[in-house]
């Protein structure tokens, strides 16, 4: 009977450990990748808007050259602030599960005006409207495609929203399970100790960190452009950093618990 | 009593640490046997974008006279030849790759085609603005084209020219048994707007000399 009780106790502790480990991972994800403000902060930190502006400007120039137009038709079409506004709005839409759309009306009007000005300047009349309209269409496609990166972005949005909701449900479920099991442990065994889950979680994170760092060279990540590469690296590093902080808090709490336990034992002894 | 208490505390701490290590072992074993394939897949995906920059000295581009193939290909974006068409006053550097970025600086070599001397289809592309291939539509049958590559010099003679739709990929037949140089640019050259056609030149090889 006693053996059965001990087995149940350690089984409960194992489940509590898995719950605590999962909660920490989900919590750090909610602080980073699943947090809209964190993502927008990363875009600022990695100078994403400036890099995107330069890329779009470069693409515009590459497209204008064979068209017969002068490079000047790309002047003053948009600013970095315009890009920032569009991206922030669409990041917000992404996290809310709304459709990603790029409003090109402003840039289209400016392009029309620049083309008209150029044609008046060199004194030419446009006879092939189809060619010019196709040019404007392709020009705006360059702008849109650079901002949204992939035409699958709305499909990705649906998947992301689905998993985001799932993670939220999972977090609440695991937290509830953790609390309930802690109460059951207290009732059945007259003690509530989270030392084993805390120590096990810390050890698991140390092992996971060593495993990940040995398999992936995070600092060499290169994807799309410098800013996006830096965002990915920052997400990795920030997740590791937050987990490390939680582990340190765990160690401090365990040490505090130990000190309080020793002090209370000494006081009992004196009494 | 004091010693007994110390012993009890130490015993409890040791027990918790031992149990923790035991739990870590169980969890790692479960993950290893159940999830290791999935974890390795995710790691491989991430490693595909983890590119270490190494200080490597790339070998010089050389031609193998036996296999009639290049031994080492030019790096993407690197200049490896010049294109010379005296009849239309063209003398431009040729780069490996044909992206719009590369073609800002000269002629782009389509990496899916062969290289001069390899005995097959060679496809070059260039912008149609002045200083590039603006005068390409003025080329005539019989005009000479020279490609001075780092590994040899190759001369071609224009056989024919065509205007094709920009999406017409059939206009670029891939030969392996005869060396054909194809050069194209956006067409028409003296209009403004989106160019839906290409001006294409076909030329056959008439001479070659290799660097020793």
Image (cartoon, helix red, strand yellow):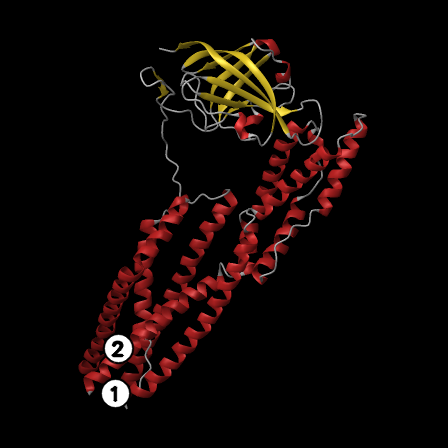
Whether residue B114 is visible, yes or no, is yes
Can you tell which of label 1 and label 2 is closer to the viewer?
2
Residue at image point 40% right, 15% down: B151
Q: Where is residue B80 in the image (x, y as percent from the top left)?
A: 46, 20
Q: Helix or strand or loop: what does disc 1 sit on?
A: helix
* A126 or A190: nearer the viewer: A126
Nearest the viewer among A271 and B50 is B50
Q: Residues within 10 Å of mark 2 (few under 14, many from 20)?
A: some
Please tell me which residue is depicted at 69% across the width and 36% down the height of the picture: A134
Question: Percent position (x, y) of residue B73?
Answer: 39, 25
Classed neighbour count for the residue bearing mark 1: other residues with Cα under 10 Å, few (<14), some (14–19), many (≥20): few
Q: Is mark 2 on a helix, strand or loop?
A: helix
* Distance between the alpha carbons at the discs numbered 1 and 2: 30 Å
Specify the subunit that label 1 lies on: A
Chain under callout 2: A
Can you say which quadrant of the picture contains the C terminus of chain A?
bottom left
Q: Is residue A53 left or right of residue B53?
A: right
Q: Quadrant of the N terminus of chain A?
A: bottom left
Residue that badge 1 annotates: A269
The answer to whether A112 appears left or right of A43 in the picture is right
Residue at the spot of label 2: A10
Q: Can residue A255 be seen in this view?
A: no
Above/below status of B51 relative to A102: above
Identified at 67% across, 29% down, the residue is A67
Between discs 1 and 2, the one toward the N terminus: 2
- Say whether mark 2 and mark 1 are on the same chain: yes
Whole-percent x, y for residue A10 in the image: 26, 77
A72 vs A255, left or right, is right
């Amino acid at each position: 009977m006693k053996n059965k009780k001990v087995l149940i106790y350690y089984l409960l502790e194992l489940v509590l450990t898995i719950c605590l480990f999962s909660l920490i991972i989900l919590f750090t994800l909610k602080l980073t990748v699943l947090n809209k403000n964190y993502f927008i902060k990363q875009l600022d930190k990695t100078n994403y808007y400036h890099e995107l502006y330069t890329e779009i400007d470069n693409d515009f120039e590459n497209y204008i050259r064979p068209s017969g137009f002068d490079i000047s038709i790309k002047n003053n079409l948009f600013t970095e602030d315009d890009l920032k506004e569009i991206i922030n709005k669409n990041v917000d839409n992404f996290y809310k599960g709304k459709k990603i759309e790029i409003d090109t009306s402003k840039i289209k009007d400016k392009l029309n005006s620049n083309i008209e000005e150029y044609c008046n300047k060199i004194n030419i009349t446009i006879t092939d409207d189809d060619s010019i309209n196709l040019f404007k269409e392709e020009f705006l496609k360059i702008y849109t495609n650079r901002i949204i990166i992939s035409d699958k972005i709305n499909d990705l949005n649906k998947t992301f929203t689905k998993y985001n909701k799932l993670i939220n449900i999972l977090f609440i479920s695991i937290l509830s399970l953790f609390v309930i099991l802690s109460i059951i442990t207290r009732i059945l065994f007259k003690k509530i100790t989270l030392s084993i889950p805390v120590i096990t979680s810390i050890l698991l994170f140390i092992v996971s960190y060593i495993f990940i760092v040995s398999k992936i060279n995070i600092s060499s990540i290169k994807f799309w452009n410098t800013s996006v590469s830096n965002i990915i690296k920052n997400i990795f590093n920030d997740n590791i950093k937050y987990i490390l902080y939680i582990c340190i808090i765990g160690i401090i709490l365990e040490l505090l618990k130990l000190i309080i336990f020793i002090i209370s034992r000494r006081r009992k002894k004196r009494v | 009593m004091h010693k007994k208490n110390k012993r009890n505390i130490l015993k409890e701490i040791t027990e918790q640490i031992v149990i923790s290590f035991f739990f870590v072992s169980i969890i790692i074993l479960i993950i290893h046997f159940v999830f290791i394939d999935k974890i390795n897949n995710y790691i491989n995906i991430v490693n595909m974008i983890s590119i270490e920059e190494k200080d490597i000295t790339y070998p010089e581009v050389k031609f193998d006279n036996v296999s009639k193939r290049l031994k080492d290909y030019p790096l993407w974006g690197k200049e490896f030849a010049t294109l010379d068409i005296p009849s239309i006053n063209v003398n431009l550097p040729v780069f490996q790759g044909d992206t719009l970025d590369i073609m800002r600086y000269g002629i782009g070599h389509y990496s899916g085609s062969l290289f001069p001397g390899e005995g097959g289809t060679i496809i070059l592309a260039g912008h149609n603005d002045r200083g590039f291939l603006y005068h390409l539509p003025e080329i005539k049958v019989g005009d000479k084209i020279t490609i001075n590559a780092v590994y040899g010099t190759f001369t071609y003679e224009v056989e024919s020219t065509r205007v094709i739709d920009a999406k017409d990929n059939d206009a670029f037949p891939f030969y392996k048994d005869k060396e054909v140089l194809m050069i194209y640019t956006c067409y028409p050259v003296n209009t403004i707007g989106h160019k839906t056609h290409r001006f294409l030149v076909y030329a056959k090889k008439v001479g070659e000399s290799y660097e020793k």
